[in-house]
Image (cartoon, helix red, strand yellow):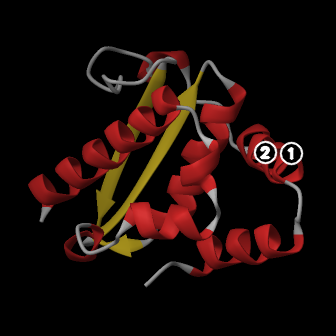
Amino acid sequence: MATEAFEEIAETFDFLDDWEDRYRHVIELGRAMEPLEDAFKVPATKVQGCASQVWLVPDVEGGTFSFRGDSDAMIVKGLIAVLAALYNGVAVAEVARIDAAAELGRLGLNEHLSQQRSNGVRAMVERIRSVAATAA
């Protein structure tokens, strides 16, 4: 059920044998993202439960979900990019059906992230699902 953008990330991860290479790729994905304007870095967009500062700005247009995000930590910004690839462009009603843990597991992220980072990813997914459920 993953998007084409997420499948591209998964294919790239298949070619990267070493976890350090995968880690660097996640960071590169974060660096490639447009930074979020400071005006959007407010309490209403901040994700609670993340060790780093994380902001997600959702957008629902024509029944399609997307979001922009940013973080003060490069690896977390990369994880935001991975989640954006997983969720952006998906119908609002389909967001809740995406098994983020399973999809991220395909990348091997589950076993290589610290407990704090894993909790942060879960908090981001919960925020995404909550916003989509409200918009549905």
Mark 1 residue element:
helix
Query: Which of these two is toward me, 124 or 68?
Result: 124
Where is 84 relative to 112, above or below?
A: below
**What is the x, y in percent for residue 2?**
49, 79
Characterize the local packing of mark 2: few (<14), some (14-19) or many (20 or more) Cα atoms within 10 angstroms: some
The amino acid at mark 1 is Glu
Q: Along the horizontal axis of the image, is 23 left or right of 132?
A: right
Query: Which of these two is toward me, 111 or 77?
Result: 111
Q: CA distance from mark 1 to mark 2?
A: 5 Å
Quadrant for residue 61, please give it: bottom left
Characterize the local packing of mark 1: few (<14), some (14-19) or many (20 or more) Cα atoms within 10 angstroms: few
Where is 64 relative to 135, above or below?
A: below
The residue carrying mark 1 is 20
Query: Which of these two is toward me, 65 or 50?
Result: 50
The amino acid at mark 2 is Tyr
Residue 84 in view, yes or no: yes
Where is 10 relative to 88, above or below?
A: below
Q: Mark 1–mark 2 contact, CB under 8 Å?
A: yes
Mark 2 residue element:
helix
Q: Along the horizontal axis of the image, is 70 left or right of 102?
A: right
User: Measuring 59% from the left and 71% from the top, which residue is drawn there?
Assistant: 106
User: Measuring 64% from the left and 45% from the top, which residue is drawn there?
Assistant: 112
Quadrant for residue 56, please give it: top left
The residue carrying mark 2 is 23
**What is the x, y in percent for residue 136?**
12, 66
